[in-house]
Amino acid sequence: MEKPEHQTPENQKPINQPNKFAQWLKTSITARMLMVGALILVLLIPLTYVNILIEERAYRQQDVVQEINQKWGNEVMIYGPILKLPYKTYSETSTFNEKTKTYLKETKTHLNYAYIFPEKLDIEAAVKSKTMHLGNFESAVFTSDMAIEGNYQKPDLIAKGIKSKDVIWEKASILFRTTNLKGIKNEMKITINGKSYTFETNFSDKASRNHLDELETGFLNEELLKTDFKFKMNVTYDGSKQIQAIPVGKTTTMKMSSNWADPGFIGNYSPDDETRSITKEGFEVDWKVLSINRAFSQQYLKKIPHLNQFAFGTKFVVLVDEYQKSERSAKYGFLVIGLTFLVFFLIQTMSKINIHPFQYLMIGLALIMFYTLLVSISEHSNFLKAYLIAGISVVLLITLYSKSILRNFKFSSLIGLSLTALYSFIYVIIQLENYALLVGSIGLFLILATVMYVSRKIDWHNG
């Protein structure tokens, strides 16, 4: 028999030679820290897409709300009534005559308009509110019955340099400006000293009126303007979002009552605190604005001023914005991933249990799934229920997964408790507004103190 050929070291194959890089990852604390940090940065990519998803759903909600409002009726703003008085002004021109060598004077007459606000304006609005749904989205809409009354003093333009003989009294009319003509549900009339006048839409010069449509009556009875007179009118709106009024009366009062439990008072003036009443069944509030409280006068020549900035009223909106809360929750995604990985890292370092980078990646993806679950469930339920379902699902998933990784009930329980505390802490911060920064800062301080205490005995110099 032939002897086996002797193998030299050159033609021998290495058997079970350990991978130096893999060994370094297992034994070096620095390597594990770099690996965990790199995975956190990688997971920021899907977390960014989650934020984009939330923004897209929020924009979709806005589109649907706008669609609901357009079908039902838009926001309401009233500006008026306003007395419109035509008057004459005169201008003289001189023309030189070459034949007679003299100047010929010619007087031209110009037609202008004066706009006079009422002496007193009282508005009473009874608002019935409800929510309308389209798919998974909802919007607040209302039907408002508004009773408007007040009085005018005998018109006098002497202070503006207009003589009574130059006023065309027989062509006076009443203007009323408003938004949401589509939402008006009754015939628009104004009663002056017992005589009724019907409003008609005037579409001229719309762009100069700050998106307010103009209604105008026919010519008033001239006899009405020779003394003080009272007016009253009623208008019913189907609207959404808000109701506002411009305080054109020298004294303006508005009383508003509604079954809406979460009103937002907006505009340039606040309602009276002493008469304000807000309960679960609705609210009832009063405003009173005096001429001394506003920076505009009662009479204007040639054109009506834009006074939208002086409007006041109530906002009717669905205050619970699930997407805003989801967005705020997702902003803490980096913190949740970082702290969860930190807990696993500390357990791995102190117990010498090996955790593969792929397992870290799976845990990170499970944490990101929390936000997609939160958004999708909150579209069909309230935020608290969605948060509980998403949180419990992710905590159980990671706890059970960590038990198979760490092979230790104590460590997996610690992971579950840590995640529960972290998600509870974030939920509390989301609910807070004025104290969110304070509570968040204290919470992060306590987390940092805990990490410092737990890691104090780790030998960071070894590896």
Image (cartoon, rainbow, N blue to C red):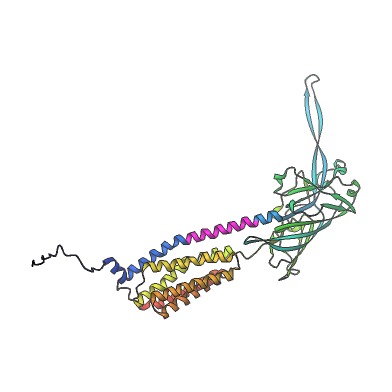
Q: Position of residue 126 (x, y in %)?
A: 78, 63
Name the one closer to the observer, 75 or 103: 75
Viewer-closest of 197 and 443: 197
In the picture as drawn, the residue positioned furthest to the top comes out as 99
Which image quadrant is residue 311 in?
bottom right
Q: Nearer the viewer, residue 416 or 222?
A: 416
Where residue 261 appears, as percent x and y from the top left, is 70, 68
Magenta span dominant secondary structure: helix
Q: Name the image quarter holding residue 93.
A: top right
Q: Residue at x 57, y 66 (%)?
A: 377
Instruction: Report the side of 9 relative to 76 (left or right).
Output: left
Compared to 270, does 196 lie above or below? Answer: above
In the displayed structure, does residue 29 sit left or right of residue 17? Answer: right
Q: Nearer the viewer, residue 246 or 373?
A: 373
- The answer to whether residue 48 shows anywhere in this view is yes
Question: Can residue 432 be seen in the rendering of this structure?
Answer: no
Which residue: 60% across, 65% down? Answer: 380
In the rendered structure, the answer to whether residue 309 lies left or right of residue 454 reads right
The verdict on residue 51 being magenta is: yes
Q: Tell me the quarter of the image containing the N terminus.
A: bottom left
Residue furthest to the right in view is: 223
Quadrant location, the C terminus: bottom left
Q: Position of residue 81 (x, y in %)?
A: 80, 52
Picture layout, residue 29 above or below residue 173: below
Q: Residue at x 82, y 32 (%)?
A: 107
User: Residue 22 colored magenta?
Assistant: no
Q: What is the residue that sits farthest to the front in this orientation? A: 1
Q: Position of residue 186 (x, y in %)?
A: 81, 54
- Residue 309, compared with residue 87, is above or below; it is below
Which residues fall within the magenta stretch? 47-65
